[in-house]
């Protein structure tokens, strides 16, 4: 009898510990890996030791595709006009291109390059608002990366939050939409996330 009670007690404790664990999204979105060439203008190959946050950006060039933005970053090795890049770019149709491995720094988020991942989002006009396909991929990718690196929604930032830059423009102009994005992240994780 005592051994049965101990067994039930152990199982109850395991169950309680399981439901205390946060849910995480384990299924990655479709990602097209197109790593930039190593160069000092867009892929410096500097180590990113620990991911402490995810920074959301907008491309600031309306109507361009993820591929065009990737190719712009790649071309900086030759043009040398600036230093810029991003780990991920999400296109107008929701396609995702990865440009830099997660364990390397991108030239995207100023003094937070050393400990954050950057996601650039394409947009259709000067408002900076994202198409629904772009938005859906942003929610999925961000939720997946949060789980992969044990981050909460407070670790998801706008470029604006770091430097005051008007980026991503739509979420700077409409902070209530940024709050909605955070709520959508939580809802996505609750719906599609699992516990160990």
Image: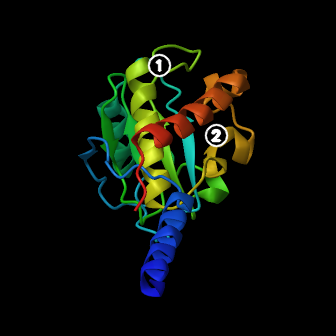
| Residue under the image location 41 percent in, 38 percent down | 140
Q: Which residue is situated farthest in the right direction here? A: 164
| Residue under the image location 46 percent in, 21 percent down | 123
Q: Which residue is mark 2?
A: 158
In the image, taking residue 189 as reference, residue 172 lies left or right, namely right
Quarter occupied by the N terminus: bottom left
| Residue under the image location 52 percent in, 58 percent down | 19
Neighbour tally class for label 1: few under 14, some 14-19, many 20 plus, Cα within 10 Å: some
Quarter occupied by the C terminus: bottom left
- In the image, residue 175 sits, relative to residue 18, either above or below, namely above
Q: Which residue is mark 1?
A: 62
Q: Earlier in the sequence, mark 1 or mark 2?
A: 1
The foreground one among 101 and 184 is 184
User: SS of the residue at dot 1?
Assistant: loop
Q: How is the image coloured?
A: rainbow
Asked whether the beta carbons under mark 1 and mark 2 sit within 8 Å of each other, the answer is no
């Amino acid at each position: 009898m005592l051994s049965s009670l101990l067994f039930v007690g152990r199982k109850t404790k395991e169950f309680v510990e399981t439901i205390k664990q946060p849910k995480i999204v384990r299924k990655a979105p479709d990602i097209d890996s197109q790593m930039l060439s190593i160069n000092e203008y867009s892929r410096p190959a500097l180590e990113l030791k620990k991911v402490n946050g995810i920074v959301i950006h907008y491309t600031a060039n309306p109507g361009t595709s993820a591929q065009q933005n990737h190719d712009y970053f790649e071309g900086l090795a030759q043009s040398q006009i600036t230093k810029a890049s991003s780990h991920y770019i999400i296109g107008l149709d929701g396609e995702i291109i990865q440009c830099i491995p997660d364990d390397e720094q991108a030239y995207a988020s100023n003094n937070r390059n050393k400990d954050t991942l950057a996601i650039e989002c394409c947009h259709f006009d000067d408002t900076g608002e994202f198409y629904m396909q772009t938005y859906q991929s942003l929610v999925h990718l961000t939720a997946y990366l949060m789980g992969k690196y044990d981050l909460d929604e407070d670790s998801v930032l706008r470029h604006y939050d770091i430097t005051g830059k008007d980026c991503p423009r739509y979420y700077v102009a409409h902070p209530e939409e940024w709050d909605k994005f955070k709520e959508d992240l939580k809802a996505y994780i609750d719906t599609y996330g699992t516990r160990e």
